[in-house]
Amino acid sequence: MVRRPSRSPKSGTKIGTSKGGTAIRVAKDGKVDAPCPQCGTVYRVLAENLDQVIKCQECGKVFPARHTAGRKAHAPDYTKAYLAFGGLGLVLVALFLVMSNSGGSKAKEVKAQTQANAQAQANQKKGDAYSVGTHPRAVQLQRWAEAFATDNRLVMKTNTDLTAVGKLLGAPDRDPDAALSALATHTLTQPLRDFAVASATLAGNDDMTAETGRGTVFLVPKANDARWRKDTRGELEVTFRKDDGDTILVTGWTLKSEPAPAKGGGRAASKPAATDAPIAQGDKPAEAEISDSAGTRKVAEAEPRAMGHWEKATPELQKFADQVVADILFSVSNEERAGAKFTRATLSVRTADEVSATVPRILNAMFELYADPIANNDKLSQLNKGLVAIVGWSVNYQVQGTGDDAKDKAARQSCVRQWFAWYHSNKANLLKNREEQENLDDSAGEPRK
């Protein structure tokens, strides 16, 4: 405790100088102004107490009152704060640049997703309701389709159910890398590389929230491609399922139509589009002579082509048909009860509508495996068995090899062509052969009339 002198200095009396050399004068009340050197807050100190130390209540600075007594208060000094924040900003910028360089396409993908989310939030703030064309799921479908033109496999992988698509494209089971490679190069994704993506939309409002859904990707000719009419567009129908979070995974697609070809244009030597029509007009069955274990004979054959869903199939029937195909292909694996899955799948196809929806999807799976019947023999033979069980008609599919790959390939491809020819001729009544067989079975125990 500082003892006060018996007498305080008079007003206006000089009692020395501050640390900076400024004369210290005493005010009428016997006090002296002592500003904080850090923030400029002024403290009134009795002249007899100038040797005391003050702790600023604003910034926490500790200083002797005599050092600043008599000096004018100055504006707060934020230099250190500015330097601190500036340094932090530089560190953040440097960290961002490092992450961008090291992350490569991943960083770009995250940035694109962030921008898409920001736009979605902006729409909500404006009070705009999502439409089937602006919903985040539609945005993801468009980005997925655009990835094929630039071979952006990160986006393909992020928005594709590689297990389901791998089976669809004939990739080895449980091999996501092989499935991704097939996805990027398969003929069924060729339209996404041949055309530009104009936009994408969901099929309906329910597809915004449902666990599974459908959408359409609209394709237009590329700017420098004169083979197609610029005022036309094509449509790719896509099915998807919801993954954890807000991500959707594409499970399948069907090319419904292409842009109209210009005069003398079109896609040379391309596979027909996967429309709902069974066989193109130029793919009518033709007679061919073959020789196999059943001898030499003439059969009807038609070139295989990609097959879409039956034109009258409801979404439920489409899902049912695709599941039957998936179960038939799964039965090739060594998984437990794989054979039982095949039996359940084929027996589940009962009504005429179920047959009409399922058969073209099995043929589509055959088409996708057609190019290499040696490597795909197990799957092709199982699909062949599935068709026999469902429609009651058969071809002489050569499961066992002869040791001559060229001969085996020709024989198995002929069987696939025979199935396409049969479908062309029997689409109106796919159950005809099965009904005839069932009638024979029912009358087997009756006396002949």
Image (cartoon, rainbow, N blue to C red):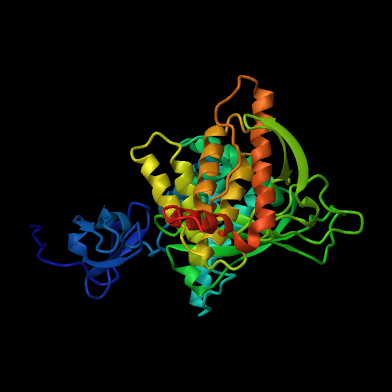
Q: Nearer the viewer, residue 434 or 373?
A: 434
Q: Position of residue 423 (x, y in %)?
A: 65, 53
Image quadrant for the N terminus?
Answer: bottom left
Residue 271 is left or right of residue 263, and the answer is left
Image location (x, y in percent) of residue 180: 56, 40
Q: In front: 389, or 348?
A: 389
Question: For this rendering, which residue is in front, 110 or 245?
Answer: 245
Work out which residue is located at the far top of the displayed protein and give it.
403
Kindly identify the residue that appears in the image at 55 percent across and 27 percent down. Answer: 400
Residue at the far right in the pictured view: 264
Q: Is residue 83 left or right of residue 417?
A: left
Q: Is 82 placed above or below 26 here?
A: above
Vertical arrangement, residue 408 with respect to residue 82, above or below = above
Identified at 44% across, 60% down, the residue is 246
293 vs 268, left or right, is left
Regarding residue 268, the answer to whether it shows in the image is yes
Furthest residue in direction bottom, as rendered: 127
Residue 101 locus on image (x, y percent): 56, 39
The answer to whether 339 is drawn above or below residue 68 in the figure is above
Residue 63 rendering spot, x and y as whole percentages: 26, 53
Residue at 36%, 44% (x, y): give it. 340
Q: Give the number of callouts.
A: 0
Q: Residue at x 31, y 67 (%)?
A: 42
Is residue 332 depicted above or below 256 in this figure? above
Q: Can residue 86 be seen?
A: no
